[in-house]
């Protein structure tokens, strides 16, 4: 398959990129990003642009894309709803609409988060915006579309988050990961599992459009 990745420099995006490049069934990976990934691989085409909406300027032909993995996102900490919506919802939808118009046969996987609010009416701002984006993506008309809702994701292979606080917390939590895995298995996943689950969703599908923790673990084993 030919894969298009947004947000390949984020913690989850780095993990997804790594799994795509390691997968023999992935023919090519195009990463559209605002800053270099630092990854050098013959299967990777990296496009660094200030405006990631511009598919034509990035040289992307949607007709050749089999799957788009949307890993682009920011922490809502310290952000107002309008600013958070511009990045989480508006940017996502601008690109998704162009992709589905050009190639409705592709699969689109939107990385959301556990607790996203599909009613769009809850008190938690980020959950409302994520839920609104999920609803809009799933209604666009892609051949298949999924909202992936990970909870705690453990980075691996030297991958780091763009959020400094997370980089402080991950080393503290890592020793307890095996315990958390036993106590609350569906609330934790590794970066490898997330990446493999997204690829498996494209290949095998999922019974529900929302991919929760248990689905991530199941798909990652396929």
Image (cartoon, helix red, strand yellow):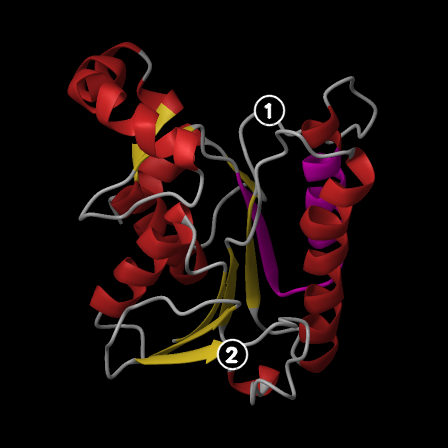
Q: Residues within 10 Å of mark 2 (few under 14, many from 20)?
A: many
Residue 140 within the magenta-colored segment of the rendering: yes
Which residue in the structure is indicated by mark 1? Answer: 115
Residue 37 spot, x, y in % from top left:
36, 66
| Identity of the residue drawn at 77% across and 55% down | 90
Q: Are marks 2 and 1 in contact (CB under 8 Å)?
A: no
**Is disc 2 placed on a helix, strand or loop?**
loop
Q: Which mark is residue 68?
A: none
The residue pinned by badge 2 equals: 65
Total label count?
A: 2
Q: Report whether 105 appears left or right of 84.
A: left
Report the quarter where the N terminus lies. Answer: bottom left
Q: Please give the name of the residue rendered at 73% of the width and 49% of the height, measured from the top-left corner.
A: 89
N-terminal label among 2 and 1: 2
Q: Is residue 117 visible?
A: no
Is 131 covered by the magenta stretch?
yes
Q: Residues within 10 Å of mark 1 (few under 14, many from 20)?
A: some
Q: Nearer the viewer, residue 107 or 68?
A: 68
Give the percent coordinates (x, y) of residue 48. Answer: 49, 76
- What range of the chain is rendered magenta? 129-148
Give coordinates of residue 11: x percent, y percent. 38, 47
Residue depicted at 69% across the width and 51% down the height = 87
């Amino acid at each position: 398959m030919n894969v298009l990745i947004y947000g390949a420099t984020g913690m989850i995006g780095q993990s997804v990129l790594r799994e795509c490049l390691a997968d023999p069934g992935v023919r090519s990976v195009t990463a559209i990003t605002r800053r270099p990934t630092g990854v050098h691989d013959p299967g990777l085409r990296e496009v660094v642009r200030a405006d990631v909406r511009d598919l034509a300027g990035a040289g992307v032909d949607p007709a050749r894309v089999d799957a788009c993995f949307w890993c682009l996102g920011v922490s809502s900490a310290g952000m107002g709803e309008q600013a958070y919506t511009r990045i989480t919802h508006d940017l996502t939808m601008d690109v998704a609409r162009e992709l589905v118009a050009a190639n409705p046969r592709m699969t689109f996987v939107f990385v959301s988060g556990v607790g996203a609010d599909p009613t769009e009416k809850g008190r938690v701002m980020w959950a409302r915006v994520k839920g609104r984006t999920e609803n809009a993506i799933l209604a666009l008309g892609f051949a298949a579309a999924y909202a992936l809702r990970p909870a705690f994701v453990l980075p691996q292979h030297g991958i780091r988050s763009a959020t400094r606080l997370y980089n402080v917390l991950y080393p503290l939590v890592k020793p307890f990961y095996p315990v958390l895995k036993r106590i609350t298995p569906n609330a934790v996943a590794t970066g490898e599992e997330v990446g493999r689950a997204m690829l498996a969703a494209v290949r095998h599908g999922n019974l529900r459009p929302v991919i929760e923790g248990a689905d991530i673990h199941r798909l990652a084993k396929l």
